[in-house]
């Protein structure tokens, strides 16, 4: 077993098979981390960008409430397809090629948004972009986790969620700048192409995952990478878990050994993001329903940066307090916050305080969406499992985003908020019984702990 953390990239000056220099290791570490963080931030960017642009899009493209819901949910629907699809491809053909292809698809989609002529075109393009984002979830964080050592892995992976919220906040700022510009929503949505282009350039030259090579029985290649970059890998444990998953493939997710991890990763993730995405996408409509529409833009900016503060806090404490404590208590508290706003919708202090606590704690727990799903599946099933959990989380988010505007029209904000509180309660109950404690465990041991229910 190698015990030095990997961090660097192979340069032409390094002879084949020779250990990489410290400078090369740091360069790979930085490149891989940035390429993954930016990819994660892009999802937040396209979700955040639609919030302030939706009003102008509705006016220019004459969208109905159903079409609004479809456009808002389009990336989430795409992720439902892209997560499992790219996850299986990455488990079968390797992490490296999928890591580049999914971002190229997103880049093309970003540019095409500028030229849409109706709601159907915008829906289809953003759905394809969602397919690429699904691939990003399935491959980006798993690849980074497979290069990370067990010490500090949670903090490293949780930092990806900071990128998501920073992307969301940045999109909000960009959207606010274009709100008074004629056709500004086109520039706002297409601006994600700039970020995607930077991400594509970073991904060239990143080597394959040594853990994936082991899962394919390519031990010599894997051990050469482990030796070269000093990757922390329990080679024997990785090889022991290989045979069963290779035999069953995608069906292994629903086998007796892995169903616990599949259910937990899917449900906790979906319960976290459903209220957040739905409320964030139609923030202006929610505030108008609460008779605070004049403050919606300012509140959305506060919403975005409070979320950044929350996920940063989650990142800082995830190794200190453990995974379960960061997940379960905030579920209960945030459910109470939404219920409180629903019960006292006429009280401005209750609305402000309730939403601030909901946003902060929901974001803090969301740091675990980049940690838990990667730790509860073995290497040969990791990207497939993460892809499926991603898809399930976006099914919930897409349903919430699609139904929220109709829920507001027919039942009002109070009902919508109570439903959101109920979803958070479901997440709390499932996590209480199924969430493993994987802090400070090697990936192979963490997956075994999740499987055994320890």
Image (cartoon, rainbow, N blue to C red):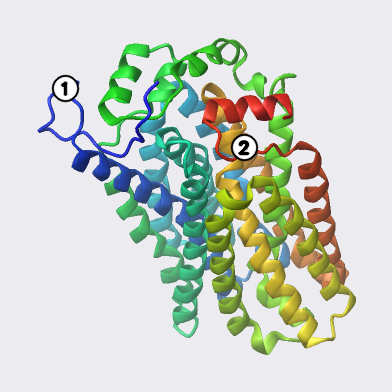
Residue 263 placed where, x, y %?
74, 34
Where residue 290 sits, quadrant-wise, is: bottom right
Is 454 situated left or right of 180 in this image? right
Above or below residue 92? Residue 32 is below
Disc assigned to residue 279? none
Disc assigned to residue 16? 1
**Could you give the CA–CA distance between mark 1 and mark 2, rounded to whole angstroms?**
36 Å
Where residue 61 sits, quadrant-wise, is: bottom right
Residue 253 placed where, x, y %?
67, 24
Q: Dot 1: few (<14), some (14–19), or many (≥20) neighbours within 10 Å?
A: few
Find the residue positioned furthest to the left: 13
What residue do we see at 40% from left, 34% from top?
A: 147
Check disc 2 and report its element: helix, strand or loop.
loop
Q: Nearer the viewer, mark 1 or mark 2?
A: 2
Q: Earlier in the sequence, mark 1 or mark 2?
A: 1
Is 410 situated left or right of 362 in this image? right
Residue 225 placed where, x, y %?
30, 24
**Closer to the camera, 138 or 180?**
138
Where residue 148 sits, quadrant-wise, is: top left
Q: Residue under label 2, please give it.
A: 438
The answer to whether mark 1 and mark 2 are in CB contact below 8 A is no
Quarter holding the C terminus? Answer: top right
What residue do we see at 39% from left, 45% from top?
A: 103
Residue 118: tell me if it is visible. no
What residue do we see at 50% from left, 69% from top?
A: 169
Residue 69 placed where, x, y %?
68, 61
């Amino acid at each position: 077993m190698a015990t030095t953390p990997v961090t660097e990239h192979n340069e032409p000056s390094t002879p084949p098979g020779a250990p990489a220099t410290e400078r090369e290791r740091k360069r790979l570490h930085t490149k891989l981390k940035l390429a993954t963080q930016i990819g994660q931030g892009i999802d937040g960017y396209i979700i955040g960008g639609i919030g302030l642009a939706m009003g102008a899009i509705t006016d220019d493209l004459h969208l109905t409430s159903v079409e609004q819901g479809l456009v808002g949910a389009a990336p989430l629907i795409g992720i439902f397809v892209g997560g499992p699809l790219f996850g299986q491809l990455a488990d079968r053909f390797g992490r490296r090629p999928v890591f580049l292809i999914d971002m190229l698809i997103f880049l093309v989609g970003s540019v095409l948004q500028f030229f849409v002529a109706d709601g159907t075109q915008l829906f289809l393009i953003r759905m394809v972009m969602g397919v690429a984002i699904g691939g990003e979830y399935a491959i980006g964080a798993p690849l980074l986790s497979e290069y990370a050592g067990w010490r500090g892995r949670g903090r490293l992976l949780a930092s990806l969620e900071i990128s998501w919220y920073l992307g969301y906040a940045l999109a909000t700022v960009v959207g606010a700048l274009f709100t008074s510009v004629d056709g500004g929503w086109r520039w706002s949505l297409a601006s994600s192409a700039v970020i995607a282009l930077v991400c594509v350039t970073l991904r060239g030259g990143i080597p394959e995952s040594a853990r994936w090579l082991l899962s394919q029985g390519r031990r010599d290649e894997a051990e050469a990478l482990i030796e070269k970059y000093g990757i922390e890998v329990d080679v024997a444990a990785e090889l022991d878990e290989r045979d069963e998953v290779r035999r069953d493939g995608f069906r292994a997710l629903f086998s007796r050994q892995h169903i616990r991890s599949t259910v937990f990763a899917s449900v906790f993730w979906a319960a976290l993001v459903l209220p957040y995405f739905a409320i964030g996408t139609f923030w202006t409509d929610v505030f108008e329903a609460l008779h605070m529409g004049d403050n919606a833009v300012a509140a959305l900016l506060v919403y975005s940066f409070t979320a950044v503060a929350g996920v940063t806090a989650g990142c800082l404490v995830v190794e200190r307090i453990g995974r379960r404590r960061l997940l379960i208590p905030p579920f209960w508290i945030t459910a109470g916050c939404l219920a409180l706003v629903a019960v006292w919708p006429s009280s401005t202090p209750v609305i402000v305080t309730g939403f601030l606590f909901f946003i902060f704690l929901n974001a803090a727990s969301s740091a675990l969406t980049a940690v838990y799903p990667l730790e509860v599946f073995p290497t040969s099933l990791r990207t497939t499992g993460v892809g499926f959990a991603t898809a399930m989380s976006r099914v919930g988010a897409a349903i919430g985003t699609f139904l929220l505007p109709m829920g507001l029209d027919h039942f009002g904000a109070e009902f919508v908020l109570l439903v959101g509180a109920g979803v958070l309660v479901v997440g709390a109950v499932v996590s209480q019984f199924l969430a493993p404690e994987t802090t400070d465990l090697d990936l192979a041991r963490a997956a075994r702990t999740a499987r055994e229910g320890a």
